[in-house]
Every structure is written in C-alpha cells, then in structure tokens.
Amino acid sequence: MTDTHSETAPDYAPVHESAEAVRRWLAERPSFALFIDGRWQASHDALPAIASTNPATGDLLAHIAQAGPQDVDAAVAAARRAQPAWAALSGADRARHLHRLARLVHKHARTLAVLETLDNGKPIRETRHIDIPGAVRHLTYHANQAALVAQTFPDHAPHGVAGQVIPWNFPLLMASWKIAPALACGNTVVLKPAEYTSLTALYLADLVAEAGLPAGTVNIVTGAGDTGAALVAHPGVDKVAFTGSTEVGRAIRRATAGSGKALTLELGGKSPFIVCADADLDAAVEGLMSAIWFNQGEVCCAGSRLLVEEAVAEPLVAKIKARLARLRLGDPLDRTTDMGALVDRVQHERVAGLVARAVEEGAAPWQPDIDCPATGCFHRPTVLTDVAPANVAAREEIFGPVLSVLTFRTDAEAADMANNTRYGLAGSVWSETGGRALALARRIKAGVVWVNCTNKLDAGVPFGGVRQSGFGREGGREGLLAYLKRRDRQQTPDTDAETATLDTDAVPAGVADAVHKAVEAAAKAAPWAQCDGRTRAAALVRLAQAVDDRRDALVDRLVETTGADRAAARHEVETSAARLYAYAGHAESHEGGASLAQPGQTVLTLAEPVGVLGIVCPDRPPLVALVSLLAPALAMGNRAVLVAGPGHAALADDLQALLAAAQLPQGVATLLTGARGPLARALAEHGQVDGVWCFTSAADAAAVEAAAADDLKRTWVSRGRSPDWLSPPAGDGAAFLDAATATKTLWLPHDA
Ligand code: NAD
C-alpha cells in the first residue's frame, strides 16, 4: 500500500447493505396509488404524481399519488365507517391486531430499513438500529396499552377519526408514533406522510392489510402540503395530530380554530446542549455526536446550540473537531457510514443558505476535511463559533448538521441563554455534579431534558414541547390521553352560549391596558411557580377558610345577583369551599412520577405549571365555576388572570377580598370584569400569557383559538358546554390538573 493511498483510504472497507429486495418491491409498483378502505385505490382527483427520489444519488425510486380533496374525502369516509366497530372491539382484540402489525414490521425490518435509507438518505446503521426497532417498540407498547385503555381511562372515549400529518425525518417511526396510540384508543386514522418520504408508510399499508386490520381502520393518503391542509380541514376529522415545522403548525392551529377538533402539535426546536466545566468532556462530545450529527441533524430535538462554560470552551471545541475529523460521510447503504445525505435538494439549499447567513452575521465556520460525495444532497458537519445570541444560527432551527457554539460564565447565564428562544422542545445538561446538573435541568423551559445523555426516547415516556415547539405529548399516559376525550354525559350547555361572542374589531385600548397590567403583575409573581406543593396547599386552605368565614355574605350575594334560592346559593358556596380544600390536597400530591423506562435510565415526569393562564369564566354558576377554574390553576403553580362577565362586578369584589384575606402574593390571581369578548381576545393575544382557558360560547372559543395561534399558546375551550360545576367528578379532578400542567420529562442515567 503506498503512502498516498493510505492517506485517502477509509479505515474500514465499505460494507454495502443489499437493496435487492427493495428494488424488486419497487419494480412491481413504479407508481403508487392511495390506501383507502383497506385497498389500493387510484386517485380520483388525478393530480400529477410526485417523483420520489433517492437524495444520495438523485435516482428516481417511484411515483406516488398526490391525493386531492375527493381522495381525502373518501379516506375520511372510510375511516368514519370503520370507527364504531373498531372502537367496539375489546381492548384485547385491538391489542391482538396491533401486536400482529408489530410482528410484521419486525419481520420486514431489513427491507424497511433499506427502503427508509434509500428514500430519506439516512445511514443504514440508523434505520436498522433506531428507526425500525423504534417503530416496532411503539406498536408493541401501544398494543399492550390497548388492552388496558378501558380500565385506565374509564371516563373517556375515542375522538373518532384522527387526521395525522407527519414530517420526513423519521418517516416510519413517526407513522407508528401516530397510528399506534390512535388505534389503541379506538380511533381510526387517515395518515398523510411527507411528500419526500412516503415509501415506508406505503409499505406499512401492505402490512396493515396483511395483519388483517379491518378495512378503513388505517388509510394512507400521499401528497404535499395541500393534501395535508385538506385533511386537517376536513369536517369528518375529529382529532388532528401534526408533527412538523412551527410555521405549518401555526397554519393548522388557525385552520382548526373554532372547529371543535382536538389538536396536538409537535413542532420545531432549537435545543440547548449545556456543558459545564466539571462535565466529562469526552462523554459530552459523544453526546454531541448524537445530539446534532445523528440523522444529519434533521432531528426536532437536536442539540443545535452548544452552550459551554467558558473555562472549557477551547478544549471542548478541539475535541469536537478531532472527533468530526474521523466521521464517515457518504453512501447511506454502507454500514460503516456515520452520516448520510440530507432529505432533498430543497433542504440542502436551506441548510447551506442558513450557514451562509450565519457567517455573514459574524459566525466563524469550520468543517472537517473528510471525504464528501460530489453529487447527492450531502452536507459536511459544520461547527459555527463566534455566534452572537442574535445570530440566525442561535435563533432559527437549521435542521441540518450544524452546531452553533456559545459560551457562558455562570449557571444563571446558562439558563437564561438556554431559554432565550421561542422554542421549548428539549435540552441536555452535562455536569459531573448531580445537584448542579439537576438544578440547571429544572430551569430549562422545555418538554424534555436529558442529564448527561441525549436523544433518549421511549414509547412509554411522554415527549413534546412547550412554547412554539407546540403542545400535547406523544408516548406514555399523556400520549394516550391525546387520543381520548371525556365522555359527554356530565356536560351541560351554558346559558350564555349565544350571547358572549367576541367581536372581530381591535381590542379597545382601555381593555388592552387593563389586561396588560394584570398580566405584568402575573409575570412578576413568577416565584409562585417555584413554591413547593405544601406552600400552595396552605394558600388554598386559607382561601377555603376565607370562603367558610364569609359564607352567609356570599350566599346573600349569590341570591342577589343570580336570583337563586337560598338553599341553592348555600350549596354553591359550600361546594366552592370544598373544591378549594380538594385542590389543596392535589397541590401536594399531583406532582408527577418516576419510571425505569429503559435499562440504566430513571425518568422523572414532572407536572410543571403552564405559566400565566388567562381564564374566561362562565356566568353560571358564577362562584363555583370561577373557583373550580382558579383552584387547579393555583394548585399547580400557575398565575391566573380571570375574566368574569359584567353582571358579576359585585361578586368579583367579594372574590378580590377573599384573595386578600388568604394573603395570596400580589399578581398570583387577578380578576377582571367587563365585556368578556374583548378581554378574552386581549389575553389570547398577549405575548406573556402562556395559556388560555375559555369556558364560554363556541364563538368565544373560535376567537380565542385563532388569536392564540400567533405564538401557539395552549388553549382549553368548552365551546358553550361546561361541566356540571356542582358535581365533584365533573367539576373537579384530573382533566383540570392536566390542563393546568405541562409534563416535563427528565432523563437521568444511573449507570453512566
Ligand atoms: P413541514 O411542516 O414542512 O411538513 C410536515 C408535514 O406537513 C408534511 O407532511 C407536509 O406535507 C405537511 N404540510 C405542509 N403544509 C401543510 C399545511 N398547510 N397543512 C397541513 N399539512 C401541511 O415540516 P418538515 O420540513 O417535513 O419537517 C421538519 C420539521 O418538523 C422541523 O421543524 C422539525 O423540528 C419538525 N419535527 C418535529 C418533531 C416533534 O416531535 N416535535 C418531530 C419531527 C420533526
């Protein structure tokens, strides 16, 4: 071997995975139809087919149909027809179906892995060891849960038809994340895969048929954004589940506002990867390889912002560069390849464009001098240093193999930098000092935080974001709940359903001002969120005692303002006090839990407060409804700005006196009375409000949901049908606590 040869030769000989079986399968179907009602159907809309190509070579793989409105209609109709019978199956029968499907995916794992690699460009090592086994795990976990759903959630029913739209970065894995929990809970589904990567979902359709799932239970419609838009807007869809970009998530929030459809959004991220000076730097570098260069950086929870303590920035960056110099970039079908191709030319251009912009804005780029194929959508791993906080590379999701490096001096600065983003999907913290790592992890505003590890996921563990990373969780109990609704029997129409509509004109300045003052005060009361459950319970008990102490005066007020008879008014006041005592109990007990999700991993699921909640209360029954909404919000550590109708100004004064008597810290709860429409809109539009609950009319709900779309606030709306506030099981409990909390998942390795 000559010297010249040894400099360029790879460390390993290429080990090619055979694509023979996949090529045979593709040759039988040069163009794909749509999978509707258990069979392949040609598109009725006859839109031009989409060419699906291999991003590593540019070769054409297949043509896939582009479903139009008629096709979406047919798919939703098939799902509707199939749903009652599917929901009526026993849990064990749904489990049998899902287990059969899981076994078939496992049986076809080799072929699916190659197909995914060809279609997406990611390395075969990842599809074989992560994507496909992950899909099997999701199907199996949810098959097991299917058998238990009726016992675990006795007060719940499936939504009906789920319309699901997924991205291209983990195509089969995302399909199983969507389909498995929906089916487990008794919904039927219409799934739209991403236009670049539909092939494994189409392969899955064959397996769905082979597994004997009833016709119409799973329907797969391919196409681009217009197909997705037609699906989420379809009136026959009851629940929309979307994974993709924040921009499209916002469009879907707007399109579904007021429709009554349940919605979960799993969106983008710009996750911090914090390395403290006392971290094991070699372990952190390996973590970074997985955080940002796994899957070519096309990972929603990618650790794309390295925040490193100044003292170790230099050695850490040197280690990163040394490690990247050994990375193998190239043929995704080669089993020794670490990084493959980006999904498409469009994505390649986007990544390259963002890197160029970052450099224009002052960042210093570095790429290893490694082989990179001249054709295909390959992008060298890139490190950007000298990244200012305002640089595009510190703010925007690049969704490619690009790491931005920023430094910090103190933990407080690290936490501030970590949270200086519109996103809140994930984060990781590296420190050998347990208490320091945990304290930082608790301060990161994100749905998932990994301590001394990264990118850990499991079907039994909730995953999802806060802020503009979306709302809702996939995995675990929360993931199942997203496919269930509370049964209707305890709900009653609100008397004011038709009257309290929001007008569409601008919010009057006086109203905006009042809301702004209340929200500012709530924002300043942030320490309330850090109080322990015991402190919050004590405050709720003081509030309950204040109601007890003023019982007769409150009864008089209710008789005077609502015309209720004394017995009814007394019952309302007593129920209000009882509810406050109950939530004092919840404040100390609804705090989350722990599980041993995987060998060597303890996972904490923390019930964290949502933040500042705007709460629009119904007119009747005024006291107990308001207390039933305020108490869970405060119990879980939120601050509340409540809105009551103009007829309740006197009662609002009484409540303000109660809050003062209970010595709640300033700004923790504020009551506003007046025209609820403009007040609700002002809350939904306010940038410092994190969530809005609206328990008035359907029109209010629509306006609140639309206004909340801008910054993707969480909303909880009754659409004119409130629970029976006076009945403990309906006006109290799990649904309120869930709405008042955002689950934060902390992964703690205990064998590292
Ligand atoms: P995208 O939003 O462009 O597309 C996602 C899907 O939405 C595709 O199937 C697309 O066809 C469809 N779509 C496009 N416009 C639509 C519309 N108006 N209505 C309905 N559907 C529409 O995202 P992408 O480029 O495919 O994926 C990358 C994004 O996905 C990144 O932002 C990434 O962070 C995010 N993502 C998030 C998670 C998570 O769990 N939070 C997981 C994976 C990817």
Image (cartoon, rainbow, N blue to C red):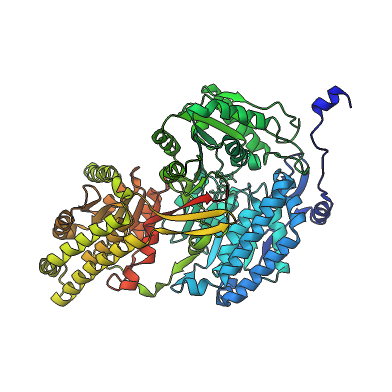
Q: Is residue 316 above or below residue 447?
A: above
In the picture, the quarter occupied by the N terminus is: top right
In the rendered image, residue 227, in percent from the top left (x then y), is placed at 60, 53
Give the residue displayed 46% in from the left and 61% down from the top: 261
**Of 638 and 74, which appears nearest the observer?**
638
Q: Give residue 607's quadrant in the image.
A: bottom left
Q: Is residue 187 above or below residue 203?
A: below
**Of 125 and 235, which appears nearest the observer?**
125
**Of 520 and 544, which appears nearest the observer?**
544
Give the residue displayed 51% in from the left and 50% down from the top: 748
The reply to whether residue 76 is in sight is no
The reply to whether residue 12 is in sight is yes
- From the viewer's perspective, tell me whether residue 553 is left or right of residue 369: left
Q: Give residue 290's quadrant in the image.
A: top right
- From the viewer's perspective, tell me whether residue 440 is left or right of residue 202: left
Give the residue displayed 21% in from the left and 67% down from the top: 577
In the rendered image, residue 48, in percent from the top left (x then y), is placed at 69, 49
- From the viewer's perspective, tell me whether residue 504 is left or right of residue 202: left
**Of 23 and 292, which appears nearest the observer?**
292
Q: How many marks?
A: 0
In the rendered image, residue 533, in percent from the top left (x then y), is placed at 32, 56
Q: Is residue 367 above or below residue 12?
A: above
Q: Give residue 568's quadrant in the image.
A: bottom left
In the rendered image, residue 430, in percent from the top left (x then y), is placed at 51, 40
